[in-house]
Image (cartoon, helix red, strand yellow):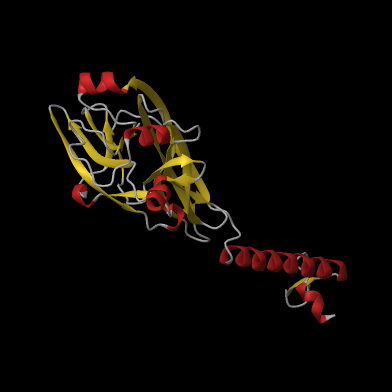
Amino acid sequence: MSFLKYDLFSSKFYMNVGGQQIRKGTVFGMLLSILIVGLASTYFIYILYQYFTNGIEPNYREQSFITQQKIDIELKNNLVGFRFEYDVNKSIQQLEAEKNKKYMVFIALFFYFDNDFYQNIQLDIFECTDENLIGFYCLDYSKVSNYTLTLSTIDNIQSQIQVFSYGCLDLDQLKTTIPDNCATQSEIDAIANGINAGQRMKFYTSQYNVTSQKTQINYRNSFVYSIASQYILSTYSAQKQITSIKEGFFVQSQSKFTSPIQYNLQNQVFDRQQALTNIGEGPFIQISVDNG
């Protein structure tokens, strides 16, 4: 039968007449050959389908580590979001709009230290436009566009984002003016002493999603409770993650993604009046974000 020539397992034999070499196939060998070719073709088509529909997970490696070398995190307007809440999920902006009174004032600084040189640059505060941060305040980094959130232990370089939350009537070396329409001090203290009162923070994180093969953005939430008589200093140290991805069907290419992945918190508590006397500053809460 002519289709026996498709037997991949056919054996060779020689004929004495004319010295011809002929392959002898069998029905079983032909069927087995068709089965193998069919399975191989099906698997190849399946692999192609998986590749073009992002079904094949790329090889990736992620690493978060502490190093003495310089580490930089890009300053984005959506890196940090914050708001003061006088009750559960109730922002001070809502209360101020209802009462037509000012309770809290926020001041933001970018601090940069390089050996003997340091500077504080005041940052503008605006209402966040990112859909994940609606109802929060964000920081405008246009004044420090040449900087990053950086840390170098060897070179003794560090930068830090600082957000101060003051009562409307407070005055110190940083907050030097009093806005119009301030609530009374007793009203402000009552807000700060609320059982659920404090500052809610949202921190930008991102991670490579191997299923969608896209960078997935999330925000970590944190809350710092307030007490009217205390100056609470909360320092969040960002940890940077480096992810390397190898992908491709025939020829693999390598990409690298870097992003903050978590923020380690350390709290310190001071008496407000004593801090005002000793260091000239007395906010309810200071949030500091550095690259730890």
Residue most toward the right? 27
Q: Position of residue 234 (x, y in %)?
A: 37, 29
Q: Position of residue 238 (x, y in %)?
A: 38, 36
Q: Position of residue 284 (x, y in %)?
A: 34, 31
Q: Nearer the viewer, residue 220 or 210?
A: 220
Q: Nearer the viewer, residue 30 or 209?
A: 209
Residue at point 52%, 49% (across, down): 59
Which quadrant: the C terminus? top left
Q: Position of residue 206 (x, y in %)?
A: 45, 48
- Figure check: 141 above or below 86: below
The number of discs equals 0
Q: Nearer the viewer, residue 292 or 36?
A: 292
Which quadrant: the N terminus? bottom right
Residue at point 53%, 52% (across, down): 209
Residue 53, located in which quarter of the rendered image?
bottom right
- Figure check: 84 above or below 226: below
From where the camera sits, is residue 131 visible? yes
Quick check: 159 left or right of 56? left
From where the camera sits, is residue 70 visible? no
Residue most toward the bottom? 2
- Figure check: 20 above or below 248: below
Residue at point 85%, 69% (across, down): 26
Quick check: 184 left or right of 57? left
- Figure check: 41 above or below 164: below
